[in-house]
Amino acid sequence: MSKKVIIIGAGPGGLTAGMQLANKGYQVDIFEKDSRVGGRNQAIRLDQYTFDTGPTFLMLLEVLEQSFADAGRDMNKYLDLKRIDPMYRLRFEGGRDFFPTGDEKRMVEEVERAFPGDGRNYLRFKKDEGKKFDRVYPCLKVPYDSLLSYLKPRFLKAIPRLDPFASVYDRLASYFTHDDLRIAMTFQAKYLGMSPWQCPATFTILSIIEHKFGIYHPIGGLNKISEAMAKVIQEDGGRIHLNTPVKQLQVKDRTAKGVLLENGRSIEADQVIINPDFAWAMSSIVKPEDRKKYTDARLKKMEYSCSTFMLYLGVNRKYDIPHHNVIFAQSYRDNVDEIVRTKTLPRDPSVYIQNASITDPTLAPAGKSAIYVLVPIANQTSGIDWAKEKKGFRDLVIRIIQDKTELKDLEQHIEVEKVITPADWQHEYNIYNGATFNLSHKITQMLSFRPHNRFEEFRNCYLVGGGTHPGSGLPTIYQSGRIAAGMITGTKVS
């Protein structure tokens, strides 16, 4: 049995695979370029404030729970999880608020309060889309190495529910009569960096996942998940090498043999797992002569998600607003078109605000807040000059927050701040085109048409992360790590 495994990158997918492999007795070495684990799931610390770099919603908890169980661990002994309820506050034009909750009875009451007459339609949505989830979700737990994968029973059972040729918006809007409620139930396509008017209706399961299973926050932030995974790996003898970037994947006779580090060391392994952003890894650490399918020209032609403009604000006061807040543009569809179709700088962007300090006292000093702001924006194919636009767009976002929310005096209370633009995602975080949600999830980039977990370019190489199956988002990234580790160990993933 091949026992030595190198994992390039200590992101969520690589850490998930590393936990399972180390627990099964494999010699696991993870090489991470940064000074801490987590990738886009790591902590940003500004003075006494702590922020998550990327994901702030923890959903479909069973995947994380199973990932720890794969390594013989009880997740709850490593993480202090709080359920967020209501899940979030949605604010529409004119200041109308809507507070979705995972409690079905209260949710029907909330729908009727905000959108009279749609309560029974919500119950129909939950019933019908729940059946869809039950059929489709099992398909995301297994690899798709070839077209023959589509002949397996779990996929054949899901076919009537896949609905790949309609859009998320077309499918879910049909349940409801109020336009704002339609947006409330379809904006989740943004979790994949896509427009709900373009995202395949297969992904209506995102909405049902929220409403069926809820949203959680680990005390300390979602970065604590990565830190816990790293701890498990080290408990089982795995080694994590921080500040140790990989320069090149070493391939011989169409077989991955190990890695060449930036420091000049060459490390051999029986298996290699690639965790960084897929297109960046292909174009940066895999030699062109070793890529027959994913050439530079092919990578350029593939379709990528949108990007994000980020603000991390250490604020010297506390605000009484919910943990999660989405402030929609006056015309949400026009804003989405600016992001994914015309790829222009939005004049009235939608804004997500996390006020996690209202739930978690560990993120900021007493009486202060760690405010996280995310604005969906076009990726780097837009040609937007962020060196020129950064300051003006930052000021626009702050004005929108002050005008449309209770944070009227936000600017004057900012003690420290950090900004990440799409250009920063590309050049500092090694994300191809600055596309923070990786490859798009159009039909021709899903399942077997997405880069395979058992990488098809050469032997003994595996992919984890948002650029492979099952796709973007923490639960599916964890699942990619489980799939890859299961392929190496010969363990069936369920």
Image (tube, rainbow, N blue to C red):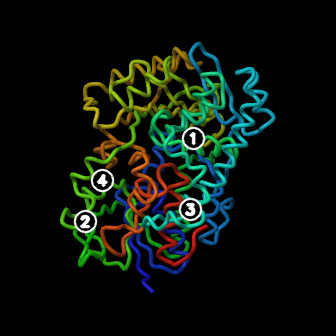
Q: Which residue is mark 1?
A: 363
Which tag, 1 or 2, sits closer to the chain's start?
Answer: 2
Which of the 4 image quadrants contains residue 334?
Answer: top left
169 shown above or below 23: above
Image location (x, y in percent) of residue 179: 60, 22
Q: Give left or right: position of 353 versus 344.
A: right
Amino acid beneath label 3:
Lys
**Which residue lies under the disc numbered 2?**
248
Disc 2/disc 4 C-alpha distance (Å): 12 Å
Residue furthest out toward the bottom? 1
Q: Which mark is residue 280?
A: 4
Residue at 62% from the left image edge and 59% from the top image edge: 157
Q: Residue at x 60, y 28 (%)?
A: 182
Residues 382 and 308: in front is 382
The Cα atoms of the two marked residues, 1 and 2, are separated by: 37 Å
Frontmost residue, 97 versus 120 = 120
Q: Residues within 10 Å of mark 2 (few under 14, many from 20)?
A: some
